[in-house]
Amino acid sequence: MISTRSVLRRKPQPNGVIPSSKHYMVTDPTSSASLRDRRHFIAYVKSRTETLIQEYQNDPFSDMFQVGRSTDKPIDVTVKDTRCSDLDTDEVSADHQAAAADKDQHRDSTISRFACRLLVNRTLPYQPRVFAAGFDNHRNICLGEKAPKWATESGMDGLTTNGVLVFHPPAWGAIGEDAPGWLEVSVRGAMLSLRSSRSAKQRGQPLVSDSNVLRDGSLIDLCGVTLLYRTKEGLDQSPTSRELDDRLACLNADRPQCPVGMNTLVIPRQRTHMALKASDQPYIYMTCGHVQGRHGWGDQPNKLKKCPICFKDGSIVRMCMGMEAAFIVGQDSTPTHAFNPCGHMASLKTVDYWSRIPFPHQATAYKPSSPACPFCITLLDAKCPYVRVIFP
């Protein structure tokens, strides 16, 4: 989901902007007075000869944070595309490889250079509000002729090409059988239902009862990367990185052994970090959850292996600990379960929570439907998203 953390801190001087009452039509937005005077504005292109300019004015009560793929100065948080992590081809069944490859084709999306912006109050309560699109180097947002746009009582509004989607959980770690749906946010912060496809020209239905104010656990999807928003109060109730390190050290201190090779297994911090010796790397059977070392016993057709403990056929994958504390649900960080098929270990509350959140992983004709592991963005198995870890 995210590979780095970004902390939103109060800026030395307020730089937030809000719509002003000044708007006018021009034939060429590049020659407008707003652009010459370096004022913030949004250009709504209606046709080749008609563009509505909506000016913005400074807001002394808020700070603005911009997110996007660009590394230019206006961007506060630079993000890059994420993809389903590549599972080892010799550890996953051919059927699952084909399914993962098919799903990954739909994830070939691009993040906008200036994807979205956040406005945060400078005084309590620090309510962050998300808006589609960010202002570029010229303090300009341009919605092209094909972008969805419409008139409201307070002025023009519109959507970006691939949209900015928002998911609000009822509370951090609390999602029932019927998970809330994803919504789309406009450039002025209005909430709408999803379009028929990611870049459809017809907007969704306005939802007056929903808000663009982020809460603890809110997700922001930028068509290529998904951001998780956590509050300070929420993180104070979660385990720290040090606690996760201590928990991993305790697991390895128990010296789990492979029942076949009779060698001690060492659980690594990440899938990219192999154990000190290849023979020490633990593998988990995703059908039954038994943990063992890598061995040649029980090879079956179609890349499956027979578990020597319960004799069930299934795929195996390298197992590791999920080490991002912001993703952990609850204060108990004991890793009792593992995501299927990636093998990331976490607590039961954590794997159950993330397995209930559908992700909008398709760029066209999409409907959020597949949960994903938050540690590696691997789409989870639809029938069995996680398994209980059983050490020998």
Image (cartoon, rainbow, N blue to C red):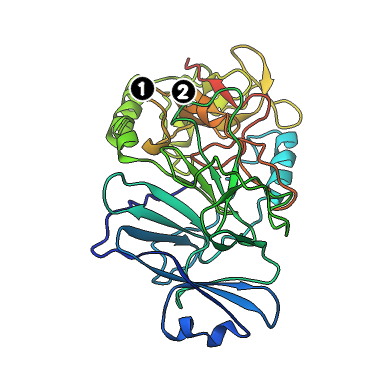
What x and y, as percent, mark residue 173?
A: 45, 28
- Tag 2's secondary structure? helix
What x and y, as percent, mark residue 302?
A: 75, 31
Residue of label 2: 349
At 42% from the left and 30% from the top, the residue drawn is 267
Q: Categorize mark 2 by other alpha carbons within 10 Å: few (<14), some (14-19), many (20+).
A: many
In this rendering, is residue 369 above or below 258?
below
Which mark, residue 332?
1
| Outermost residue to the left | 12
Q: How far apart are labels 2 and 1 at the CA level?
A: 9 Å
Query: Of the residues shown, which amino acid type is indicated by label 1?
Result: Asp
Contact check, label 2 and label 1, Cβ < 8 Å: yes
Q: Is residue 293 visible?
A: no
| Outermost residue to the front | 153
Q: Is residue 133 visible?
A: yes
- Left or right of residue 101, residue 125 in this image: left
In this rendering, is residue 260 above or below 226?
above
